[in-house]
Image (cartoon, helix red, strand yellow):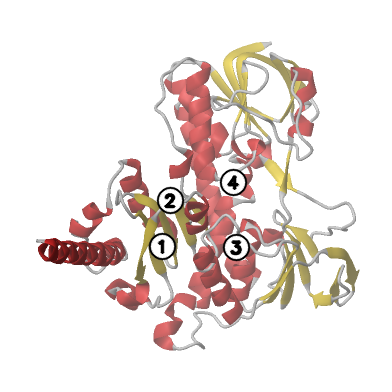
């Protein structure tokens, strides 16, 4: 039986960083992954292919150029799945090569197959032929991720009724689509297919969508999607989905019936801890297949850690990478700096993008934190005009007394890139005075930080002037009263 200092189960972003961190510390590390899933869901069916699809949609539809060349402008009039998938396959292939190269270069042993625990310190790895290889380790990191949650009442056929893993394998661009679930994945795909000209209906049982985001930003996104023909049905629940030769019929609990070529179910994800037989290691998963960890990503069993989507929110590739690194460092008593969860950015790659870091207006209001808002609109920036983006905006939330940056919210082109400037300022405890005094390249979207900071600063100056004027008048009244008494 092979023995390792650490075995990482899962080669997604969290698993990669955990294994490589161990190798950098001089530990004997192995990573387990199924042969056709090197890179995990992120590379094969999730983040990378969906974001590549997004770029292909933007390019082929010419969507970002329409403000300049008219609403009818398209780079290609008849966009096929082949057009879309060519770019995706190219990028996925390159990313898999990069991951395999990094693991090999760092001396991480790759064990191909499906793993499951046989005891707290041992796993079995079953390869494609059914052969078993038993491996033991001092430490384990579980980074197996999740799979789409599938209601048992829905018949997924991979063609007309699909989940978020299957949608990339569609054989044609549907004329109409129902998206069940207005979470991040559902909204991203809804926006992409709407850009392709698909008639999209989004069904969400909650009264709003993306309720962890800033309300103004979400309203801006909804407006843009409605402009592209997306219909939203909030407060509605799907009762059943019927499949017919001519398409699907989604029947809602309210009695509404919605016909469509395709139905995409995007109603959450389920941890794959059941396949790991975690009970043999002394662990118990919740009803969504997730594992509970402490602040160091250690499970109830001291030598077993869990990172990435398997532990729940925020379930993002970026945060998962850092979790993997930190888990390994803690496992081998390596010092690691403090982290602030409030400073981890969120990126939603809809069309248009949303990205934010820090707190929202609603959160600050609920906490009774005095704040001021500074806004820069892309249409006010020369770069926005050059790019043809007149709807984007950058919003800064600033402490009204301390002048520190409390939140950054971006909407529009390159939002997920733009947010990192604010993230850095917040991480260093900076104030908006830095942004007011800084010089940004012109023309850039980054210049929006100066515009928004000046907006907030001018509002706070106006408040200070009102107070100063009031204090002066009080002093004048006091002088008159004193003179009268004399």
Visible residue check, residue 420: no
Distance Cα–Cα, label 4 vs label 1 = 21 Å
Name the residue tied to disc 2.
369
Q: Position of residue 453 (x, y in %)?
A: 28, 61
Residue for point 58% across, 47% down: 43
Distance Cα–Cα, label 3 vs label 2 = 32 Å
**Counting residues from the N terminus, which is met first, the one under dot 1 or under dot 3?**
3
Q: Secondary structure at mark 2?
A: loop
For residue 39, which quarter of the picture? Answer: top right
Visible residue check, residue 140: yes
**Mark 3, mark 2: which one is toward the viewer?**
2
Distance Cα–Cα, label 1 vs label 2 = 29 Å
Q: Position of residue 378 (x, y in %)?
A: 36, 72
Labelled pair 4, 3 in contact (Cβ < 8 Å): no
Labelled pair 1, 3 in contact (Cβ < 8 Å): no
**Counting residues from the N terminus, which is met first, the one under dot 2 or under dot 4?**
4
**Mark 1, mark 2: which one is toward the viewer?**
2
Bin the neighbour count of mark 1 within 10 Å (Cα to Cα): few under 14, some 14-19, many 20 and up. some
Q: Nearer the viewer, residue 243 or 236?
A: 236
In the displayed structure image, the side of residue 166 where residue 107 appears, left or right:
left
Distance Cα–Cα, label 2 vs label 4 = 37 Å
Name the residue tied to disc 4.
42
Residue for point 46% across, 33% down: 102
Quadrant where the N terminus is found in the figure: top right
Q: Nearer the viewer, residue 335 or 148?
A: 335
In the displayed structure image, the side of residue 53 where residue 107 appears, left or right:
left
**Mark 4, mark 3: which one is toward the viewer?**
3
**Counting residues from the N terminus, which is met first, the one under dot 4 or under dot 3?**
4
Q: Nearer the viewer, residue 100 or 175?
A: 175
Name the residue tied to disc 3.
188
């Amino acid at each position: 039986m092979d023995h390792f200092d650490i075995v990482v189960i899962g080669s997604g972003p969290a698993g990669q960083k955990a294994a490589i961190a161990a190798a950098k510390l001089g530990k004997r590390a192995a990573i387990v992954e199924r042969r056709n899933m090197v890179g995990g869901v992120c590379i094969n069916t999730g983040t990378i292919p969906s974001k590549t699809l997004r770029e292909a949609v933007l390019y082929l539809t010419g969507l970002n150029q329409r403000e300049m060349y008219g609403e009818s402008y398209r780079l290609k009039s008849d966009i096929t799945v082949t057009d879309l998938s060519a770019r995706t396959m190219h990028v996925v292939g390159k990313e898999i090569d990069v991951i395999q190269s990094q693991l090999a270069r760092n001396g991480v042993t790759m064990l191909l197959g499906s793993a499951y625990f046989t005891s707290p310190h041992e796993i079995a790895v079953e390869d494609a032929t059914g052969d078993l290889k038993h491996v033991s380790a001092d430490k384990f990191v579980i980074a197996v991720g999740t799979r789409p949650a599938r209601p048992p009442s829905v018949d997924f056929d991979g063609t007309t009724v699909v989940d978020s893993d299957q949608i990339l394998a569609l054989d044609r661009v549907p004329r109409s689509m129902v998206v069940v679930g207005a979470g991040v994945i559902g909204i991203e795909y809804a926006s992409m297919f709407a850009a392709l000209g698909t008639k999209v209906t989004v069904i969400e049982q909650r009264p709003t969508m993306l309720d962890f985001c800033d309300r103004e930003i979400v309203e801006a996104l909804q407006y843009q999607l409605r402009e592209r023909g997306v219909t939203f049905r909030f407060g509605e629940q799907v009762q059943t989905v019927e499949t017919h030769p001519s398409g699907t019929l989604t029947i809602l609990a309210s009695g509404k019936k919605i016909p469509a070529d395709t139905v995409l179910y995007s109603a959450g994800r389920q941890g794959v801890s059941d396949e790991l037989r975690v009970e043999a290691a002394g662990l118990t998963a919740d009803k969504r297949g997730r594992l509970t960890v402490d602040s160091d990503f250690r499970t109830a069993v001291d030598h077993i850690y869990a990172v990435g989507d398997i532990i729940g929110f925020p379930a993002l590739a970026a945060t998962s990478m850092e979790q993997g690194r930190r888990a390994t460092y803690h496992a081998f008593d390596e010092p690691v700096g403090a982290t602030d969860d409030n400073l981890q950015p969120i990126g939603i790659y809809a069309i248009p993008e949303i990205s934010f870091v820090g707190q929202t207006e609603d959160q600050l209001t609920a906490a009774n934190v005095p704040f001021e808002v500074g806004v820069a609109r892309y249409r006010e920036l020369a770069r926005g005009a050059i790019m043809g983006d007149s709807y984007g905006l950058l919003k800064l939330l600033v402490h009204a007394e301390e002048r520190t940056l409390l939140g950054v919210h971006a909407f529009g082109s390159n939002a997920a890139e733009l947010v990192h400037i604010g993230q850095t300022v917040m991480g260093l405890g900076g104030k908006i005075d830095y942004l007011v005094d800084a010089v940004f390249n012109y023309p850039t979207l980054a210049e929006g930080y100066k515009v928004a900071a000046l907006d907030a600063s001018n509002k706070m100056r106006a408040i200070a002037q009102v107070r100063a004027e009031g204090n002066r008048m009080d002093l004048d009244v006091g002088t008159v009263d004193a003179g009268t008494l004399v």
